Image: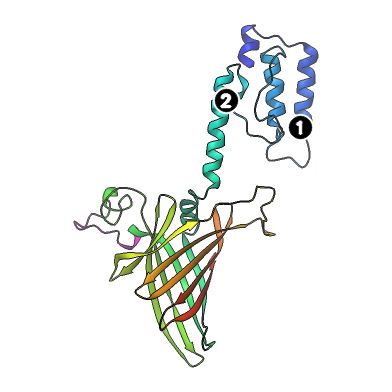
Amino acid sequence: LAAGVMSGKISISEDEYDAAMKTSQTIRNYIPRAQFPHFDYPGYMDSLSQLCYSGNYRPKYNTDIGDMIVPTFYQQNEKLSDECSLEMQKEIERGQDGSRMPKIVLQSILGSWSFDRHIVHLQTRKVERVYGTVKFSKYWERSSSSDNGNDDDDDTADNLFSDGSKGDNPVLYREDGFYEYSPTQSFEVFREYEYECNHDALEIYFVEAGKRAHLFLCLKFLPETMTALEQKFDEDGGYWVKATSDHLCIKDLYSATFRVKLNGLSASEIVIKYRVKGPAKDYESTTILRPNWS
């Protein structure tokens, strides 16, 4: 618009200019000041396009207040507008089908957590407890030194998988705590897993003797079936995402449910449940993790 006015191709009367400036000042000087003063972007762009096209053109898509705005909608080639709208819709669908959640979740859980686990043996109703700390960290931090002792080599440190291929590093889950077998019996325990994104799944691998072993779980996040208006948020604005997976260990079936509460792109709570059933096992394990902010 500025280029059109300066080149003389678009003319704006003094009355239009004064009215526009008055409207802009009213919006910008409103108290309390909004994070995005010009929230009505469709209306804002409509007024610009009317000036640019002498009032003879209105966009075909995204005309409601709060809709996403892209320049393609504000030009007169309808084929380009149609292609842009279709691509935007596909992108929205990809964001809602759960395929991107593994990477979001894996990034959100990095850091230090406290955990409390209760194991309920369903036949005897005996309850055992495990509690302590968990750290989710980039795997290379755990084994940052390479075979040649060069810790500063990016290719052998933070840019490699365990097998030496380049890509996003797996995340190491390290758990340290106490297993409370009874009110008078407890002992120290630890365990490790590797978490890694593989396409639309979050894979969890056993770690044995400091090295990755076989696959434990392949977590598939459930697609969100509710619209944004129907989505139920907690009082703090957080929302839950969930994934499930089964693992058969010889004759014991582990049915896992992995729930993460997201506040923006940060996780504020994790709940991991295992229902384990086999010839000699019949128990349910529930682990609640909360971040250590200190």
Amino acid of disc 1: Ile
Residue 145 on the magenta span: yes
Residue at (51% x, 86% y) in the render: 123
| Residue 13 in view in this figure | yes
Q: Secondary structure at mark 1?
A: helix
Per the model, the C-alpha gap separating discs 2 and 1 is 32 Å
Residue closest to the far left: 148
Query: Helix, strand or loop at disc 2?
Result: helix
Mark 2 or 1 closer to N-term?
Answer: 1
* Side of 112 where 62 appears, left or right: right
Task: State which region is magenta.
Answer: 141-150
Residue 218, magenta (yes or no): no
- Image quadrant in which the N terminus is located: top right
Rendered position, 184 above or below 62: below
Q: How is the image coloured?
A: rainbow
Give the residue number, with chain letter if any, for mark 1.
27
Please report the residue visible at 61 percent of the width from the left and 51 percent of the height from the top: 225
The 10 Å Cα crowd at callout 2, few under 14, some 14 to 19, many 20 or more, is: some
Residue 196 drawn at (x, y percent): 39, 56
User: Where, by quadrant of the figure, is residue 83 drawn?
Assistant: top right
**Picture quadrant of residue 236:** bottom right
Q: Is residue 11 above or below residue 228?
A: above
Q: Which mark is residue 76?
A: none
Farthest bottom residue in view: 184
Estimate the x, y position of residue 198 in percent, counting from the top left.
39, 52
Can you say whether 155 is above or below 30 in the image?
below
Q: Is residue 248 left or right of residue 21?
A: left
Amino acid type of the residue that numbered disc 2 sits on in the rendered structure: Asp
Can the viewer see residue 291 in this picture? no
